[in-house]
């Protein structure tokens, strides 16, 4: 959708204008030469994509809202017919447009989301008494074949989201040996490892934004697990965070450079170091206590920024 | 699309620039995640500075005037730190000191019972605007623009003017981004303000997602807007932006394509009058695409998805009516996508 060089061209143009290498009157001409204005064909493609995905999402959310509204004027069979009809239409669309990947992806996404609406409608109509976690788990299990054939990263992320929800709700209902954050941390970290490993084999999985999103989830819960470990004195939490930090550093520094992940790691290290000091320093909360924490944060933040920038500079073509 | 060196070569061939230092223009500009890391570290350090002030000078918290004076002194100190040094360490320190100073100024305003709440938010918005203009630091400008946008939203909420808020900020955002290279020589200053304002706007439009028990994080009641007025004004801003894009890009739509464009506008205009935030998200996406800005485009996509989710919780109309509105919009969207594809295959538009 966007030109791959647009970020570099925008930065160069900003430099030229700020450093007064370009006359003010020449700026519009320079913008045209930098091709920062989309061509008509690009506009058409963008409008088409925008309309298609807005339409697909609008229709799917409409069905979900409709089921949630639980309209009594419409009989149960009509409701089931509506949702199942949408699923059937989506699957037909997927099979019919076998040469258009965008339409195929859209159709499968509608089908996947509509299965959730269908399951909610089933539970609402027949009062099955099932736990909420079962809804999301069964939803994930039933839609797995579509996710497998889709070769579409959004479907995989959605599927992972369903697993996260079902694990979280399961822990809410039944509890477990450890806090639910441990289970969600392990789930997302495994997903990250599998995704990163598979990205070298399957081109369609090699999308940095999707890897970064799972990395963010994994890092967020790693931090959470660390807090539990530190303040509730559960050694396993700290150990898991240390393993996570070493793995992220090794993989994203030496195997495949990913400065986004390393930035997240730096933030995690700074927060962890501060937490460790808060836990270990005498809890007098005097001026010295805050000066130490402030100096640590600014010092470590400065070092991290310089290091990350140097990695980016090395990575320049 | 040209890469940086190709662009420089082309500009030289066209005699738009002379012989300049190539490396200077290619200097690495930090990506958004490093800026976020710096911002979060500054914010964390600011909390510790506030802790230090509370521990060492606890008595000043009883005196709003003293708080204000210390706050302004810290902001002034931060300004000189940021102006005087290229060092990364001093930049972090300056950011933290300034954020702590701003917090003290805010405490001074809100702890002083003689000052009206609406006036406090107004003053805070003005202070943040001044800081966004003056402070010589990208992260600081972005944070100040964000705080200014949030303060303005709270001022307008207290004044019962929330229905006009999103259109005003959306218009400012659109003007900033569409003229980022031509408005002034301070391109990055404008960009930082633009990002801060967009994030503040998205937060306002999706505030119901961050509410708990019907109140905001400040324990204020949620902003109440008149949906048709709020969205209607957003649609007017969208029409202005589209007019600007068509005029600026000189894109001429031939024959049926003109009717298609009108049908599309009528659909979005009528369909989204009672669909909170959808126009705002789509417009941010359109601007992001028009200026080829990846971060803005992603923010627009996130805003649209978050607005669709927050729409579920809005109580202005029933879920059933919301589902009919979305079905109409979605069905028409898919239909128009197919019609547009047909029209595109019949004849490409041309640029004059």
Image (tube, coloured by chain):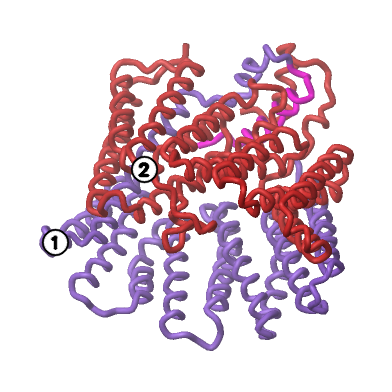
Q: Residue at x 24, y 60 (%)?
A: A67
The chain letter under disc 1 is A
Q: Which residue is mark 1?
A: A72
Q: Which residues are magenta?
A: A1-22
What whole-number distance in Å separates the C-alpha atoms at marks 1 and 2?
A: 28 Å
Compared to B192, does B224 lie above or below?
Answer: below
SS at circle 1: loop
Residue B95 visible somewhere in the drawing: no
Horizontal relation, residue A83 to residue A203: left or right: left
The quadrant the N terminus of chain B occupies is top right
Mark 2 falls within which chain? A
Chain represented in red: B
Question: Toward the viewer: B24 or B90?
Answer: B90
Q: In which quadrant of the rendered view does residue B272 lie?
A: top left
State which chain is coloured purple.
A
Image location of residue B50, percent across then percent down:
76, 59
Residue at 55% x, 24% y is A37
């Amino acid at each position: 959708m966007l030109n791959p060089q647009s970020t570099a061209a925008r930065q160069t143009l900003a430099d030229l204008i700020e450093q007064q290498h370009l006359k003010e009157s020449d700026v519009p001409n320079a913008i045209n030469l930098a091709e920062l204005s989309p061509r008509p064909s690009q506009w058409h493609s963008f409008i088409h994509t925008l309309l298609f995905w807005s339409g697909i999402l609008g229709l799917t959310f409409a069905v979900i809202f409709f089921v949630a509204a639980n309209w009594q004027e419409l009989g149960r069979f009509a409701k089931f017919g509506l949702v199942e009809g949408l699923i059937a239409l989506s699957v037909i669309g997927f099979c019919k447009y076998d040469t258009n990947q965008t339409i195929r992806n859209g159709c499968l996404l509608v089908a996947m989301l509509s299965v959730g609406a269908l399951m909610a409608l089933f539970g609402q109509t027949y009062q099955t008494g099932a736990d909420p976690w079962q809804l999301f788990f069964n939803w994930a299990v039933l839609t797995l074949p579509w996710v497998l054939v889709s070769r579409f990263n959004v479907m995989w992320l959605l599927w992972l989201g369903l697993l996260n929800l079902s694990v979280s709700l399961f822990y809410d209902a039944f509890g477990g040996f450890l806090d639910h954050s441990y289970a969600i941390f392990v789930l997302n970290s495994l997903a990250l490892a599998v995704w990163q490993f598979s990205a070298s084999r399957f081109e369609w999985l090699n999308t940095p934004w999707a890897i970064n999103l799972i990395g963010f989830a994994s890092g967020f819960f790693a931090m959470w697990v660390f807090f539990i470990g530190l303040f509730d004195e559960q050694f396993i939490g700290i150990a898991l965070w240390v393993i996570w930090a070493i793995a992220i550093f090794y993989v994203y520094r030496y195997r495949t450079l990913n400065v986004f992940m390393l930035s997240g790691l730096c933030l995690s290290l700074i927060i962890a170091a501060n937490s460790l000091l808060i836990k270990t320093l005498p809890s007098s909360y005097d001026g010295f206590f805050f000066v130490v924490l402030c100096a640590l944060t600014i010092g470590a933040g400065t070092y991290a920024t310089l290091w990350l920038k140097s990695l980016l500079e090395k990575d320049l073509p | 699309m040209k890469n940086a060196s190709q662009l420089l070569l082309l500009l030289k061939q066209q005699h738009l620039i002379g012989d300049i230092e190539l490396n200077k223009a290619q200097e690495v500009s930090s990506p958004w995640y490093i800026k976020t890391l710096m911002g979060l570290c500054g914010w964390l350090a600011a909390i510790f500075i506030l802790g230090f002030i509370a521990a060492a000078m606890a008595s000043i918290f009883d005196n709003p005037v003293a708080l204000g004076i210390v706050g302004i002194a810290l902001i002034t100190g931060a300004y000189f730190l940021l102006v005087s040094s290229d060092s990364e360490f001093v930049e972090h320190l300056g950011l933290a000191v300034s954020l702590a100073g701003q917090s003290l100024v805010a405490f001074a305003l809100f702890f002083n019972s003689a000052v009206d709440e609406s006036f406090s938010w107004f003053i805070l918005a003005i202070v943040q605007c001044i800081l966004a203009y003056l402070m010589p630091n990208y992260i600081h400008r972005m944070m100040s623009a964000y705080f200014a946008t949030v303060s303005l939203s709270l001022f307008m909420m207290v004044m019962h003017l929330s229905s006009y808020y999103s259109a005003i900020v959306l218009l400012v955002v659109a003007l900033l981004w569409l003229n980022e290279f031509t408005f002034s020589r301070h391109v990055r200053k404008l960009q930082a303000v633009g990002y801060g304002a967009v994030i503040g706007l998205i937060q306002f439009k999706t505030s119901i997602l961050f509410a708990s028990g019907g109140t905001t994080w400040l324990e204020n009641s949620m902003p109440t807007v008149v949906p048709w007025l709020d969205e209607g004004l957003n649609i007017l801003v969208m029409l202005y932006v589209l007019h600007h894009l068509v005029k600026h890009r000189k894109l001429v739509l031939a024959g049926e394509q003109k009717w298609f464009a009108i049908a599309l506008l009528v659909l979005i205009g009528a369909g989204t009058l009672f669909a909170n935030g959808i126009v705002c998200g789509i417009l941010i996406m359109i601007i992001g695409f028009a200026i080829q800005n990846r971060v803005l485009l992603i923010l627009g996509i996130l805003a649209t998805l978050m607005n669709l989710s927050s729409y579920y919780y809005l109580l202005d109309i029933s879920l059933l009516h919301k589902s009919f509105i979305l079905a109409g919009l979605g069905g028409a969207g898919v239909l128009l996508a197919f019609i547009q594809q047909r029209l595109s295959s019949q004849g490409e538009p041309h640029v004059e």
